[in-house]
Image (cartoon, helix red, strand yellow):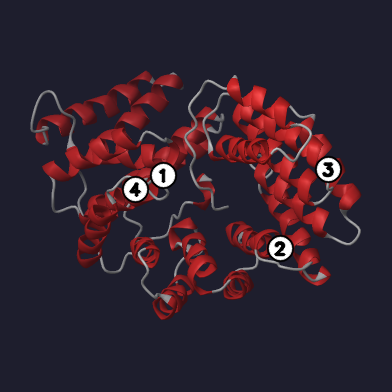
Amino acid sequence: MLVNIGTEEGNSWLGHIYNLRGFVQYKLGFIEDAQSFFNKAAEAFRQMRKADDGPWLVVNYGNLAWLHHHLGNQAESEAYLSKVEALMKKYPSPSQDELHAEIYAEKAWTLMKFSGDRELVSDYFQKAIRMQPDMVEWNTSHVIGLASFFENCDTGLEADILEKMRVAKEQDPENLCLAVHYLERRAKKGERVEDEARELADKVLRNSVSSFSSMKAILRVYRNYVSIDEAIDLAEKALENHPEERYLMRCAALTLKWKIIRFSDSRPKQSMIDRAISLHKEVISRYPHSSFMTKIDLATIYAKSNHGQAIAEQMYQELLESDLEPADKQLLYNHYAKYLNFDRQDQNKSLKYHMKAAAIPHQSFYRGNSIRLLEKTKNKRRNSMWREIEEFLEHLQEPVVSLQHWS
């Protein structure tokens, strides 16, 4: 995931990205790479802030002090700690009880990318913005974070978030990520956005190829509010322009999966299925350590193929036999249950796996989805398992928080 976060010049979070990548490289044992990223972070901050020093270097110098300490270079470590102390004296925080705004902003950005603690993210951003209200990129990231966190929750805050996005867009008109999220929010409120979406898509195509280019977000807008076929064409055009970019391969694979699994009233053309299989295999090879969901998608696509049912079953069995965390196991059971019902026409076995998914006490979209299906089956009383399902549901004690899922 980190590799896909943009490192192009002009990215306002470039220094933070390099800091984070340096930390990860150190934890992986790649010491030289870690130091290189920390040095790149310092240079990125200098270029972005147009100054040789400032409070934004506190985290960076702290990282370098920490790195040299763990390498046994105590003199270097002490030198960087001295730089940290000098910066904190030169740029003190407004209160002894608070960190500097730059540190709050970096914490907020990192947590936004890799944590679900939306309250803490929002709190850190608000503290940073209160201290330095002129930092447009902080407000933009805060608003995007709010929109993402509350994307599928009926909180009653929709009008407030939409207004915050409108104001943020006026302050940061060139930010494509914000523009796409704002467009999507307006579309959800019922606005016609097709022409504006196409204009934004052209800008995204001309922009960077990393995840900061908002390609996945604009494809989602196309899928929901323009057309799935145009989404496929857009993803293929982006990949044609940058054929070696694995992130764009993932986007192209995603659009074909949407078409094959969710948008086909009849069996998709075999040529489209073959293209989807090829892309998914390539994505798995390019993301060897984070391809769990892609493998499930590939198995599901094989099940739609003329001669792929046996391969689909084999893939699912291999996944079912693998050592998985409870959340991943729950996700797998939910998908396998749907495969059994729709592609194997084995409703009873499908219901068994929905029960397996629901039995795992992890609140998620997948658990909620399985429980709703089980309740529907129980209430209709047409399936011979309805009494077993009724008893099973009576013993489920944990409340279910159901969130929409769009992948």
Answer yes or no: do the residues labelled 1 and 3 have beta carbons within 8 Å? Answer: no
Residue 59 position within the rendered picture, expressed as x and y whole percent measured from the top left? 29, 34
Give the residue type at disc 2.
Ile
Give the residue type at disc 3.
Asp
Compare marks 1 and 2 and give the one earlier in the sequence. 1
Question: Which residue matches tag 4?
Answer: 145
Viewer-proximal residue among 34 and 364: 364
Local crowd size for mark 4, using a 10 Å CA cut-off: few (<14), some (14–19), many (≥20): many
Quarter residue 92 falls in: top left
Question: Which residue matches tag 3?
Answer: 346
Q: How many marks?
A: 4
Compare marks 1 and 4 and give the one earlier in the sequence. 1
| Residue 54 visible here | no
* Left or right of 18 on screen, residue 25: right
The residue drawn where x is 42% and y is 49% is 152
How far apart, in angstroms, are the residues tagged by discs 1 and 2? 38 Å
Residue 143 position within the rendered picture, expressed as x and y whole percent measured from the top left? 28, 52
Answer yes or no: do the residues labelled 1 and 2 have beta carbons within 8 Å? Answer: no
Question: Which residue matches tag 1?
Answer: 18
Local crowd size for mark 1, using a 10 Å CA cut-off: few (<14), some (14–19), many (≥20): many
Question: Which residue matches tag 2?
Answer: 260
How far apart, in angstroms, are the residues tagged by discs 1 and 4? 20 Å
How far apart, in angstroms, are the residues tagged by discs 1 and 3? 50 Å
Compare marks 1 and 3 and give the one earlier in the sequence. 1
